[in-house]
Image: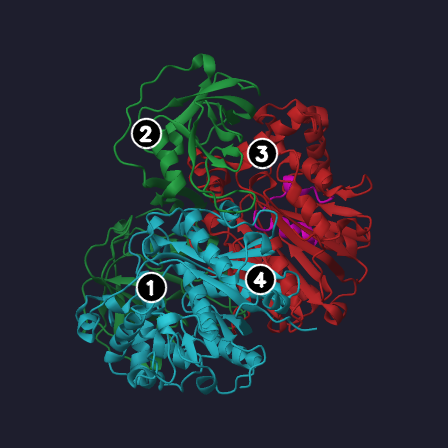
Amino acid sequence: MGDLPVIDYTLSFPYTRTTGPVMGPFLTALRDGQILGGRCGDRVLCPPLEYDPDTGAEVAPDLVPVGPGGTVTGSTWVSTPTEKHPFAEPFAFATIALDGADTPLIHAVKAPGPVEAGTRVMAQFRDERVGAITDVYFVPEADAVEQTIAPGDEPVEITEHLIGVRIQEDLYPFRKRYAQALLDGKILGQRSPKSGKVYVPSRGYDNMERVPMTEADDVFLPDIGTVVSFTEITPIQYHGQTETDPYIRCAILLDGADQPVTGIDIRDLRPPEFKVGLRLRCVWRPPAERDVSELDNRMGAIPEGVYERWEPTGEPDVNPDELRGQAW
Amino acid sequence: MSALPCAVIGTGQTKYKRRRELTLDGLVREAALRALDDAGLEFTDIDAVVIGKAPDALEGVMMPELSLCDALGAVGKPIHRVHTAGSVGASTAITATTLVESGMYDTVLTVGYEKQSEGNATWALSGGKSGGQGAGGTFAPWIREYIARSKAPEHIGWLVAVKDRQNALLNPYAHLHIEDISIEKVRESPMLWDPLHFLESCPSSDGAAAMVLTNEAGVKRTGKTPAWVLAHAKRTEFSMFPGRDTTRPQAGVECAEALYKKAGITNPREQIDCAELYVPFSWYEPMWLEGHLLAEEGEGWKLTDAGDTALDGSFPVNMSGGVLSSNPIGASGMIRCLEAADQVRGACGEHQVEGAKLALGHAYGGAAQYFAMWIASAELNPEL
Amino acid sequence: MVSRATTLREPVAVVAAAQTKSHRRFEDAEPQLIMEVVNQVIEQSGLDRHDIGFTIAGSCDYLSGMPFAFVSNIDGVGAWPPVYESHVEMDGAFALFEGVVRLQLGDIDTVLVIGSGKSSPGTPRNVFPLQTDPYTMAPLGLDPISLAGLQADAMVRAGTATERDFAEVVSRSRRDAMSNPFAQVAKDISVDDLLAEPYHTTPLRQHDLPPISDGACAVLLARGATAEQLSDNPVWITGIDNRIETHHFGHCDLTTSPSTSLAAEKVGLHDGPIDVAELCVRYSPEEIVLRQAMGLADGTTINPSGGPLAAHPVMATGLIRIAEVATRLANGEGRRGVAHAASGACLQQNQLCVLDRERP
């Protein structure tokens, strides 16, 4: 039998950023081993901007080389870097007044220890450059090495950024009991202490009456119910999508429940046999094979990991008119 | 005391196609600068900025007002960020309106945007997991329920899909320009979520829309043609609860009732000249005509069928081509409000409804549970 | 820019306020936190939930790791029959700003304001870089702690503060938090003991940073006569305004906060003495910057709750400042106070809300 999941996932997506008329040349230059600033009135800003940061007024792109040397104007020593930082070992974030620029750039300095204001630093370019701010970093001038950078071919017009947020938590208390029940081949709901309505899966509270619910409100439901609505899904491909073939996703109103269980996947039945009003029974997987790892605190009701299929009970269909207000 | 009058005096839109040549800054600035130009104003004339967009995860930029404030000339000003799912563009316009109506700020810039090409909406709607059903998969069962109830014939959805794309041909900002759009083409496009075909669904667009809102003094000072915001309303209900009517959500009905009451409208179908309704899937045209009291229950599809909602019909809907032709999500609701304003300003060019004096802008979001609507009027005190 | 006070045409008051305990990890859903505080303010005011004119909530999808996470938060508020409500992807304090704006229109009498957040499932230090410039900062993982380190460094170098000053803020906050039942971090600890701790991000130590917290806050606003009906001790909002600065922190003098000073001018902060101030001090140096930018006199009690250094449920933190000031004034601990809220790193956006026991 499967275990209760501890939620640990990373919401991640490979975003693409188009770089535009100023950031594009700036990032292209970084890839090619050069840092550019942008003229804005009588100042040179680095990084360069499409607009005057004080007023929003338009600034015609006028990019000029700055650096590669500069002077640290302020810094902080990061003793415990995060996985998102440019270095795994302690380093400094610093404001760096690059030679030729009037505003400091905030960037990372790789150094053996804290970097004092006034320290001269030099840009160093990474071996693998993609046209990103991370193509460059800084070191104290004395540690700089001479680099020969081969420029790339195409201008950097689009960049990719895999952005991920890791989420770690336990199942909420009701979800824990609910998941355990599924592993036991049972469906657990909750009866509102105020309205008497039965919700499955419950959220652990009754939003209609705005009351929290506790273990005392738990009720088991039969694994038989009626199809109240469905969609035939033709999977759209996107990052992380593993579905390829069409299938049915339906909502089933379990006998005794006041709200349908949504998102149940059906792969062996098709319309017209599959229809609103059809009576279905859950055919559970053997206990040892049941898996609730798909459940988290938001998504998932009765995951495919616990059932083999939903089979027609053979009872007469329920008149769809009686299911009005349950379309989901 | 009551709300001070507020008017739209400038509007700006970007072309709603995939914008590979622009940064996020560039995208919002294109709309904002056009709106300012239309109003004859500059960033320095703006007292506060209100922005709206759908989830931050669509572009992977958290609380983007922080990184867009300087691009929008908001440094030294208040900036506010609204997020109410798909209805957000209209909600944002409404919040911006209240800033002027409150008397706290004279002239406000509002911007809604989405750069869908930076991320993927279906991914985001699926919580980043496999097996997402997309918005179409959520709405399809409700559409089937509407069809069953209203006994509408299947071609109604195709009619809407064709009509909105034909209107889009008259709107240079629209994303989709399908010159040879036809009933056959819609009907023969792939079935995505029964009964919705591919061409009955909205595209995925980049884009921004912006408006400059001001008070009576601002209208007088700039001398620009105003669209007065006669009324606005918002309503929300739960996404799911026992007995919920998903085809005609009560929140939508009550939102419309509140809106018309505030505007002094007693017969919306007759008194309103045209409407920009949030129709991301074809069938939502008749569903919202009914759900927002513009047609009797079961009668909405008959208006569509009779051509009443066409550009030259008795009650034109989605003159701009609507969400079916352009869907930069966070901007989509604002575009509805903006187009309603431009209609009564007489600024819609080829898709102008002649003599439009009162226009409805509308958006909905979430599981058809968030509603935001406004009425734009050519006159501050119209005779209804 | 025209420099004039942002005036309120309609008097608005806080008539009820509630906050949850600041949890290091709340084991249940965010709507449960919201339900707890919403039920409390409804009970305090005696108002029927269905009579609330407008509800406005602030929360953050990215903290929850789920796009559209805010949708389920409405469960804690109630939305059947349908309600008039909206949502900002900002701290609840900015939601309160919208609530005050909305009440000026004169057609509704009450606004329920909510701020809520659970930071515990994610790693805030890894999430918040996504607030910075998406081209030149976010890819570096430039996090608010590192940026606070740069701000603190700028202050020490400019001589506007010392590490001892930072430790004094922390020592006082932690001691004050001992009398705050909602606080997460409370301790009687001396400045010297704090200074003996190792650096985290120079010149900051771990204790200069806020805790990671889950929590929620709700405030009920009412206007005019309704406020006086709903509460024996309404606390009036006499000014509210926010201002933002560039996100290119390299362009800023981090030792000052011009946006805070501007907001202070707009809300008429210096029209009278300030007895109590609750400031959104997420990093101890911020208190010193804010005091100076707001021109707070020595007689002003600052962060008697312990402030965000003792409890930091992101998205509720700013609203809690307003709830704290309102509750203290209602209890007679002073006549006039100010609540500050901030958004972004290095005090990029700042809101001030002036509260007064006397109706304006």
Tell which tag, 3 or 4, sits nearer the viewer.
Answer: 3
- According to the picture, the residue beneath numbered tag 1 turns out to be B174
Q: Position of residue A171 (x, y in %)?
A: 43, 50
Chain B: colour as depicted: cyan
Give the chain coloured red: C
Residue A129: numbered disc: 2
Q: Amino acid at mark 2?
A: Arg
Q: Amino acid at mark 4?
A: Ile
In space, the residues marked 2 and 4 are separated at their CA atoms by: 46 Å
- How many marks are shown on the rendered structure? 4
Q: Nearer the viewer, residue A23 or A279?
A: A23
Compared to residue C270, the image places residue A249 above or below, namely below
Crowding around mark 1 (Cα neighbors within 10 Å: few <14, some 14 to 19, many 20+) is many
Tell which tag, 3 or 1, sits nearer the viewer.
Answer: 1
Chain A: colour as depicted: green
Relative to residue A218, is residue B4 drawn left or right?
right
- According to the picture, the residue beneath numbered tag 4 turns out to be C56
Residue C305 colored in magenta in the image = yes
